[in-house]
């Protein structure tokens, strides 16, 4: 098997490439891979799609609740199997790909918006819990460009440790002031902070998820001090922060589908705990994401037939048409309003910005920080752009294959003029995904 051509600027790096094992070389933080950048035209809409990766290497993007681009706006960070268990970054202009972790990570890749730094959790092995680590990406990219790479300790900083009895995966989020990280805690720890008479929720729905208790804690990035934030009687998921307002958190009741009350918000000191959008039994709320300093986007699903029975023509349990099981209850039909919804954190007012006429309806949603655009995907992996100024909604890109390993998960760039997705459009196996950027055509601005 041939080694990948790795861009370096020194004879030493070239000799390393020519000799030794590709796997050993690729294990080093800062290793560079050649550009795979391709610009293709969407076969349905004609919109230009910039694929920053285009080989079947197990790529997937960061979840839409978190930043995708580095602080300078030039690099996209993503998960990949180019080096199994390690994270990558791709330069949007040049297409250069750089390995940015060494030694693995677990859970959420969390980018700073103020400095060139990546935060993540790493398992310490055995019963030793997790370490919170950050990587100086600015220094790493510079050394990688010149070929003068150092040991990983030259780029890593250890901020603190989470004991094994407290650890609950690597789901975490960086505070807007970037002085703290928030993370999920174990049921054992969460339970200690609940009132003795609290009624613990049981699993909800056919996936047997959602049982409590759950909780969130914080870690001071300077001292490593851990403080408990909040406990709730249900399973916590999708911990995220308001990227503009310090100490404001959003999280969900995670069931793998419909929850009795999906969206929640709380302050970092545990005060202000409340449902973000109080939902009715007939509403299937999902995939919340903070999009501006005052707003959270989410989907109110309209993916189920009004009469929930097999005779409706919908295959129950079909992975291409999920959420049809009767155990989810009566929600998710279009008997009531559905679509891409946006709720204001201050006024608590909600409005529905748009919905597809047919099909599953919008599923994973996001919006531009300037408040101009909203975007959502549906079960067909098609994406629709909504102009919040004119209320015009149109298909922007399609053909991303229902057989893809995951959903597109659109996320806007801070500039608001483009968004990132993951796509199987170029994949011969119809499953493996690549990192793709969709730019909003200039002609779409101001048009109705």
Image: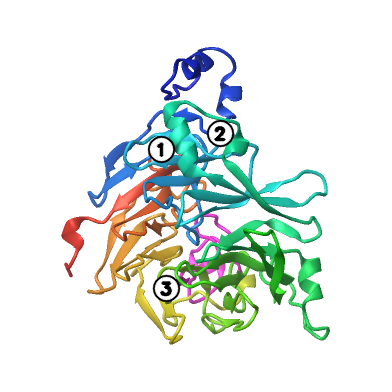
Q: On residue 53, which mark appears?
A: 1
Relative image position of residue 238 (x, y in whole percent): 58, 64
Lower position in the chain sequence, tag 2 or tag 1: 2
Relative height, residue 286 to residue 73 (above, below): below
Q: Nearer the viewer, mark 3 or mark 1?
A: 3
Q: Which residue range is magenta in the image?
A: 296-325
Please name the residue shown 39% across and 52% down the image: 420
- Specify the quadrant of the image occupied by residue 294: bottom left
Residue at the spot 16% in from the left edge and 67% down from the top edge: 447
Mark 2 or 1: the one toward you: 2
Q: Is residue 418 magenta?
A: no
CA distance for labels 2 and 1 = 19 Å
The local crowd at label 2, few if under 14, some if 14 to 19, many if 20 or more residues have their Cα within 10 Å, is many
Residue drawn at (52%, 46%) of the image: 405
Spot occupied by residue 55 in the image (x, y as percentages of width and height): 43, 33
Task: Identify the residue position indicated by label 3 in the image.
Answer: 293
The reply to whether callout 3 and callout 1 are in contact (CB within 8 Å) is: no
Along the viewing direction, whichever of 299 and 8 lies nearer the viewer:
8
Q: How many marks?
A: 3
Q: Which quadrant, please, contains the C terminus?
A: bottom left
């Amino acid at each position: 098997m041939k080694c990948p051509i790795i861009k370096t600027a020194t004879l030493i790096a070239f000799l390393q490439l020519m000799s030794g094992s590709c796997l050993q070389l690729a294990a080093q933080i800062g290793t560079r891979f050649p550009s795979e950048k391709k610009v293709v035209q969407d076969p349905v809409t004609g919109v230009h799609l910039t694929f920053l990766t285009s080989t079947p290497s197990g790529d997937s993007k960061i979840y839409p609740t978190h930043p995708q681009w580095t602080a300078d706006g030039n690099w996209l960070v993503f998960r990949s199997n180019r080096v199994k268990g390690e994270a990558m970054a791709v330069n949007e202009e040049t297409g250069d790909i750089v390995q940015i972790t060494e030694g693995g990570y677990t859970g959420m890749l969390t980018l700073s918006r103020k400095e060139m730094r990546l935060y993540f959790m790493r398992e310490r092995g055995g019963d030793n819990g997790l370490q919170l680590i950050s990587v100086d990406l600015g220094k790493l990219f510079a050394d990688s460009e010149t070929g003068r790479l150092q040991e990983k300790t030259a780029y890593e900083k250890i901020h603190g440790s989470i004991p094994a009895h407290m650890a609950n995966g690597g789901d975490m989020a960086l505070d807007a002031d970037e002085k703290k990280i928030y993370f999920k805690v174990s049921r054992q720890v969460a339970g200690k902070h609940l009132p003795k008479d609290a009624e613990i929720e049981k699993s909800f729905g056919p996936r047997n998820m959602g049982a409590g208790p759950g909780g969130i804690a914080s870690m001071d990035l300077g001292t490593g001090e851990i403080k408990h934030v909040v406990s709730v009687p249900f399973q916590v998921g999708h911990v995220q922060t308001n990227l503009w307002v310090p100490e404001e958190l959003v999280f969900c009741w995670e069931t793998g589908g419909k929850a009795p009350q999906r969206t929640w918000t709380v302050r970092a000191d545990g005060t202000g705990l409340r449902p973000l959008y109080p939902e009715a039994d007939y509403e299937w709320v999902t995939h919340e994401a903070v999009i501006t300093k005052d707003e959270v986007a989410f989907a109110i699903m309209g993916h189920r037939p009004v009469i929930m029975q097999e005779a409706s023509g919908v295959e129950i349990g079909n992975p291409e048409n999920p959420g049809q099981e009767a155990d989810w209850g009566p929600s998710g039909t279009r008997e009531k309003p559905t679509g891409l919804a946006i709720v204001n954190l201050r006024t608590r007012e909600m409005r529905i910005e748009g919905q597809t006429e047919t099909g599953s309806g919008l599923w994973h949603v996001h919006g531009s920080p300037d408040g101009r655009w909203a975007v959502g995907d549906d079960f067909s992996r098609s994406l629709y752009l909504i102009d919040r100024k004119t209320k015009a909604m149109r298909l922007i890109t399609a053909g991303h294959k229902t057989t893809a390993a995951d959903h597109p998960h659109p996320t806007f760039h801070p500039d608001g003029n483009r968004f990132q997705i993951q796509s199987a459009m170029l994949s011969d196996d119809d499953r493996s995904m690549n990192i793709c950027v969709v730019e909003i055509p200039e002609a779409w601005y101001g048009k109705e």
